[in-house]
Image (spheres, rainbow, N blue to C red):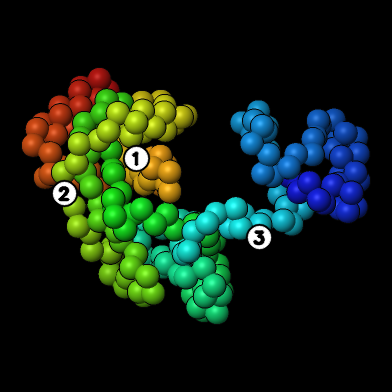
Amino acid sequence: MTARAARGLDADLPVLLAAFAAAGAHAEIADWDDAAVDWGRFDLALLRSAWDYEACLARHSCAGVVVKPAVGAGSRDARRHERAATGEMLAHLQPLLAAGRSMMLQPYLERVDRDGETALVFIEGAFSHAIRKGPLLPAGAAATAALFAPEKISPRVASAEELAVARRAVAQVPFGQLLYARVDLVRDAAGQPRVLELELTEPSLFISHAPGSEERFAAAALARLRAC
């Protein structure tokens, strides 16, 4: 994958295309940020000259950003920074990159400060319950040193649009129907729900905030056991 502006500048691209063709493989050049590209139709995507990626943040009107590990849990090593605080971001990034961690940067959606997150829990593919998480990353605060950041949890009635987005997210899972899944949503500046995380392996399911969900979970787990 490349950038539009790099198509005539990256001398590697035509050479690599010819090499793949000679090896009997079909290769294409695609712009990394082209929304029309169906990345699922490729067997392999190679990151090559996506040299305009610094423009991503410029597309968002956010005042802050989140710097976090690409693989993490409990908000460990995740911090919220002011958009212009590059020195603070680098100080955060450098030790983690030196340790071999892959990092990512996200725009901070400021409605989280007011609305929090909505976490929707699914059991055997069916929606079970939802909770509200309060904002986890105060501006300028250090990353948590605990197993997970303290959370303010309360029950929440998911809206119809939140349910629709969460169901679409769960439907994309390519592993068949899972015993459980959790979809975390936040709202953007226009109020539209956006997927923050799709938790599939070991998420908190906030069972204690949804009476009856413990019976649903136990029944689903035992049904799988009996089917073995």
Quarter of the figure that contains the N terminus = top right
- Assess disc 1: are there few (<14), some (14-19) or many (≥20) residues with their C-alpha within 10 Å of its C-alpha: many
**Residue type, mark 3 in image:** Glu
Asked whether the residues under the numbered discs 2 and 1 touch, taking CB atoms below 8 Å apart as contact, a structural biologist would say no
Question: Element type at marker 3?
Answer: loop
Q: Residues within 10 Å of mark 3 (few under 14, many from 20)?
A: few
Residue contact between numbered discs 2 and 3, judged by CB atoms under 8 Å? no
- Which residue is pictured at 50% across the width and 78% down the height? 88
Q: CA distance from mark 3 to mark 1?
A: 28 Å
Q: Is residue 86 above or below residue 75?
A: below
Quadrant of the drawing holding the C terminus: top left
| Lower position in the chain sequence, tag 2 or tag 1 | 2
Q: Which mark is residue 154?
A: 2
Q: Position of residue 142 (x, y in %)?
A: 36, 75
**Disc on res. 54:** 3
Mark 1 — residue? 183
Does 137 appear above or below 21? below
Q: Amino acid at mark 2?
A: Ser
| Viewer-nearest of discs 3 and 1 | 3
- Tell me what residue is drawn at x 41 percent, y 68 percent: 79
Residue 14 percent coordinates (x, y)? 90, 44
For label 2, the SS is: strand
What residue is at 42 percent from the left and 47 percent from the top? 188
Mark 2 vs mark 1: in front: 2
> Which residue type does callout 1 highlight?
Val
- Mark 2–mark 3 Cα distance, whole angstroms, equals 37 Å
Which of pointers 2 and 3 lies earlier in the amino acid sequence?
Answer: 3
Q: Taking 170 as reference, is 107 left or right?
A: right
- Cα distance in 3D space between marks 2 and 1: 16 Å
138 and 119: which is toward the camera:
138
